[in-house]
Structure formats: C-alpha cells, structure tokens
Image: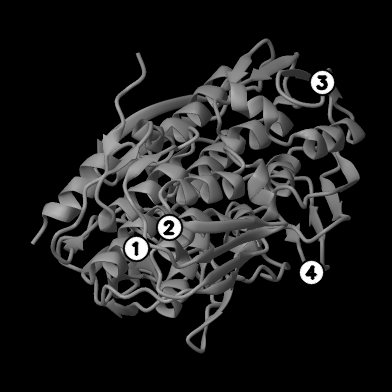
C-alpha cells in the first residue's frame, strides 16, 4: 500500500529556529567522482548521506573504487576513497539522480568492458541524448539514446559540439572525467543558453582544486587538458538549496530562521536565496558563526593550478520587485585538504581547521585566510511580496519561490526555467497544477510561471516523486490548514531527515 499522505504542519506562531544543514548533494557527488578518478587515495569529509549520494557511491564501487565510511555525524559521512582500475561488467542503477545518470557514463566509457545503466521509470524520460551523442562522437559505443543503455569504450576524447540547453549536467559530466581522456576534451555548446551555469562553475572550481587544467575563457567553450587528477582531502559545504524551504518559513510565519556555516563565497545556486528572499520581503543578514554550528568547513577553493586563470564567476538570479535586484552568486566552490590553492595561499591538509571568521590554520604552521563562513539569518514579517525573477541559473530554487509566490499579496512571474520540464518531473506543469488544486491562480508560460494572489485552501499536494515539489507543499502548508503532501518520503533524495528537521524547526523556541 502507498504511504499515507503527510499532513503538512500549519504554523500558529512565528518560527524562531537554527537549522544546521547536511552537505551539498552537488558538491558531494562531484567530490566522490573526482576522488574515484584521482591518482591516489583521498578523503571526502561531511559528504551528504541521501539517496542520490548513495547511488553515486554504489556506482563508483561497481566500477572498481573502494569507498569506506570512516565516521558519520549529523554533518555527514567521511568517506575514505581508494581508486582502482575502472572495470567493466557492471550494472549501474541511477535511480532518479541526474548527477549519476550524466556524470558516471563518461567514467564508464573508460572501463575495460561494457557497463549498463538503468534507473527509476521516470529516469527513462529525462533528457540524455546530448551527452550520449557527445560520448559517441568521442569514441564510445552506446546502444540506445536514453535509459536503459550500455556503454563501451575506448574513449579517446577530443573536440565535441553539443546542445546543453536542456541541462548543465551534460557539460559537467564530460568535464569531470575529461582529464582521464587520452586527448582531454574541448566542448562547444551550440543552442539556446545553458541553464544553471553556477553548477558548471562549481565543476570547474573543483577540477582546478585537484590540479586539472581547465580553460573556460571563451563563451560556451570549455577545455580540459589530459593529465592526472591529484588526490585531495575535500570537505563538503552545507547544501544551500536545501535551505530554501526553511528560510521560506521565516517569510511565511513572520519569524527568524538561522542557517549556520553559510559560505561567504560559493558557487552553489542556493546562495541566490539571499537576494531573492530580500526581494520578497525578508530581512537577510550575516552574523558571526553560532556557537552550536556544526563543524562544517567551507574554505572555498577559489584558484587554479599554475598557469591557469580562474575565469569561472558566479551568476545568480536576476529579480525585480519592490525595487530590488537579486543577482549575486559568489565565486569559489568547496573546501579542500591535502594541498590546494586557497585565495592565493597554499594550505596543507595536515591538521587543518577552519573557524567561523574564515581563518584557516594548517598543521604545518602555514596560515591562510580563506573565504570562511557566517550564520545566515532570515527574518520575515508574515507579508510576502510577489517577484519578477529570471531563475535560469538557479532553477532548482523555483519550487520554493513558486510556493512563496502562491502566498504573496502581489503577482509574480518566474522566467528562464523551461529546462525544468526535464527534471524529476515537469516542474512547471506540476507547480501550476498543484497550486491551482489548492485554489490558487498559477499559469504556465513557455519558460516559467505567472502566479497571481488568490486565497488557498487545504487539499492534497502531489509530489510527483520530486523532492523539491514535496518541500514546496510543506511551505504552503505553513499558512494553509489542511494541506497533505503525497509521498513526503521522496525528500530522501537529497534530505532524508526533512520531516524531522521541519518538525524540530516548528517546535523550536
């Protein structure tokens, strides 16, 4: 029998809570894959433990990497990663994880035999053609244009042209493994604009942090030179996109929510929340790190290997509303141990600690000042203003912004997110359907949504097995009694403890 619907709690008082977040899914799965391709063992610290991350671990193990959990806390799991020869004969279950279905096939093309891929039923509908065609052009053999498929090498690398307008993951997937290709890679994007550019910038920063030479100086062109991927100890930032529903709760209830260890500089899309929520009526401030913050190191690697310039810059959402502009995603990516270049200073992994002020001291006696972290504090008034926002670069925030827009006092327009139709579900159709099911006024456009004020009522909010749809339903439920979210368990994709965290937030005082 299907699980019963989850009664979304309605807030009766303003929320006042500190909400520590586990590690970023996007950083976790990139870090695990790079560690598996490295020239020696390494450690990925405070990695997210979720369905998507578990699928990546299983995929890398199937291909010959040894991953051993060393320690697990509320901040995440520390993985000892020991690379091995990439072996064929494996079957990879991608689930519904875009990072697994698009990042692992280029690695599998380096295996000594064929590797098969399949996933959840909806995964078979998600776009795969551009990256599979690119791998064919680079020398791989693939027997289908979507899941399920089997891939065989060898893969020499070289130059390839593709249309990445459907997903930035097509580019990131090729870049992550490209240093292991005999000829490296040159990728040229031809087509409508690439969405979610901060995710490509994250990939580039992380590649440079492990010694890979990347040239991203030409628009829509990316080059990776062949060569080793250095073993590094890496520490994962908190998942800022998963902060979205919790920070939204401050606006809905007129309360205050604090997220500890928010990086001062990051390529995560979730950093755009600072400006988006300000536009919708929140007060957003940074304060010194809270004494109960988890030990989340986020010394964002913000440089390159010698002879290469850091050209990746953050690009956030642009938004207008109440005279505000939301456009600010910082550069840099994630913490690194071993030897990495941090803000122009070399820091080693032996005995490294990071304080809330951003000062990093290494066991060797070298001191460097990294980007560091602060607490992010969001306070609402209970009054939400509509927004006109282009979310092309930060599309994963759309469900939360749409939920807030459904509760706003003025109309909203969300633009630039046509690529969301190819996510876990068609998020634009799903959001319009579910908001309207609760009595709202949401209209799909070619590339987004128009949401007009209308009083909502209770009812079932379907999740479509999409974790961000489920959390959007929870946000609406804060203000609308009687909302029941179907399949809240789908939040395990990126935040397995969501229900417990949501309940704790509402009970905190």
Q: Which mark is residue 403?
A: 2
Which numbered disc, 2 or 1, marks the residue closer to the eye? 2
In this view, the mark in front (2 or 4): 2
* 462 horizontally vs 19: left or right: right
Q: Sequence-wise, which precedes: disc 2 or disc 4?
A: 4
Q: Which residue is mark 3?
A: 144
Residue 301: x and y, percent? 51, 63
Q: Which residue is mark 1?
A: 248
Q: CA distance from mark 4 to mark 1?
A: 36 Å
Identify whether 402 is placed above or below 424.
below
Q: Nearer the viewer, residue 54 or 500?
A: 500
Residue found at the very far top of the displayed protein = 89
Label 3 and label 1: CA atoms lie apart by 42 Å
Residue 496: where, in percent of width, then height?
Answer: 33, 36
**Local secondary structure at mark 3:** loop
**Residue most extreme to the bottom:** 323
CA separation in Å, label 2 and label 3: 38 Å
Residue 303 visible in the shown view: no
Q: What separation in Å lies between label 4 and label 3 (alpha carbons)?
A: 34 Å
- Residue 462 image position (x, y, % from top left): 44, 37
Looking at the image, residue 375 sits to the left or right of residue 323; the answer is left
Which residue is pictured at 68% across the width and 66% down the height? 306
- Residue at the spot 19% in from the left edge and 68% down from the top edge: 290
């Amino acid at each position: 029998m299907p699980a019963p619907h989850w009664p979304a709690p309605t807030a009766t008082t303003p929320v006042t809570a500190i909400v520590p977040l586990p590690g970023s899914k996007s950083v976790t799965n990139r870090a695990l894959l790079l560690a598996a391709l490295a020239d020696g063992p390494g450690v990925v610290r405070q990695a997210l433990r979720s369905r998507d991350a578990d699928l990546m671990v299983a995929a890398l193990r199937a291909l010959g990497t040894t991953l051993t959990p060393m320690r697990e806390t509320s901040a995440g799991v520390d993985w000892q990663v020991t690379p091995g020869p990439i072996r064929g004969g494996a079957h990879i279950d991608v689930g519904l994880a875009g990072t697994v279905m698009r990042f692992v096939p280029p690695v599998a093309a380096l295996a000594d035999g064929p590797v098969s891929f399949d996933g959840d039923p909806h995964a078979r509908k998600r776009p795969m053609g551009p990256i599979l065609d690119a791998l064919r052009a680079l020398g791989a053999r693939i027997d289908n244009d979507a899941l399920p498929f089997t891939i065989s090498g060898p893969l020499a690398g070289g130059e390839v042209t593709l249309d990445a307008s459907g997903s930035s993951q097509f580019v990131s997937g090729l870049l992550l493994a490209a240093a292991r290709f005999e000829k490296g890679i040159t990728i040229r994007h031809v087509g409508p604009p690439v969405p979610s550019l901060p995710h490509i910038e994250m990939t580039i920063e992380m590649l440079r942090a492990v010694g890979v030479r990347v040239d991203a100086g030409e628009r829509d062109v990316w080059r990776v030179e062949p060569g080793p991927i250095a073993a590094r100890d890496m520490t994962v930032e908190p998942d800022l996109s998963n902060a979205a529903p919790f920070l939204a709760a401050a606006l809905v209830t007129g309360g205050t929510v604090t997220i500890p260890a928010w990086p001062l500089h990051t390529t995560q899309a979730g950093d755009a929340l600072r400006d988006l929520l300000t536009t919708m009526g929140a007060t957003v401030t940074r304060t010194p790190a809270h004494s109960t913050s988890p030990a989340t190191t986020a010394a964002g690697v913000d440089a390159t290997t010698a002879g290469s310039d850091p050209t990746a810059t953050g690009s956030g959402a642009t938004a207008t509303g109440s005279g505000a502009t939301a456009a600010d995603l910082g550069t840099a990516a994630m913490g690194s141990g071993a030897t990495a270049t941090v803000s122009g200073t070399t820091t080693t992994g032996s005995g490294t600690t990071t304080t809330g002020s951003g000062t990093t001291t290494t066991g060797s006696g070298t001191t460097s000042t990294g980007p560091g972290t602060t607490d992010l504090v969001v306070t609402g008034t209970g009054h939400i203003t509509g927004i006109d926002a282009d979310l092309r670069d930060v599309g994963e925030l759309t469900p939360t912004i749409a939920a807030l827009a459904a509760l706003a006092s003025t109309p909203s327009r969300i633009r630039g997110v046509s690529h969301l139709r190819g996510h876990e579900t068609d998020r634009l159709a799903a959001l319009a359907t579910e908001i309207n099911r609760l009595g709202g006024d949401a209209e799909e456009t070619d590339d987004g949504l128009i949401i007009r004020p209308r009083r909502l009522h209770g009812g079932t909010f379907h999740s479509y097995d999409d974790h961000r749809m489920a959390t959007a339903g929870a946000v609406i439920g804060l203000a609308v009694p009687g909302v029941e979210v179907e399949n809240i368990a789908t939040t395990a994709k990126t935040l397995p403890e969501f229900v417990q965290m949501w309940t704790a937030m509402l009970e905190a005082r």
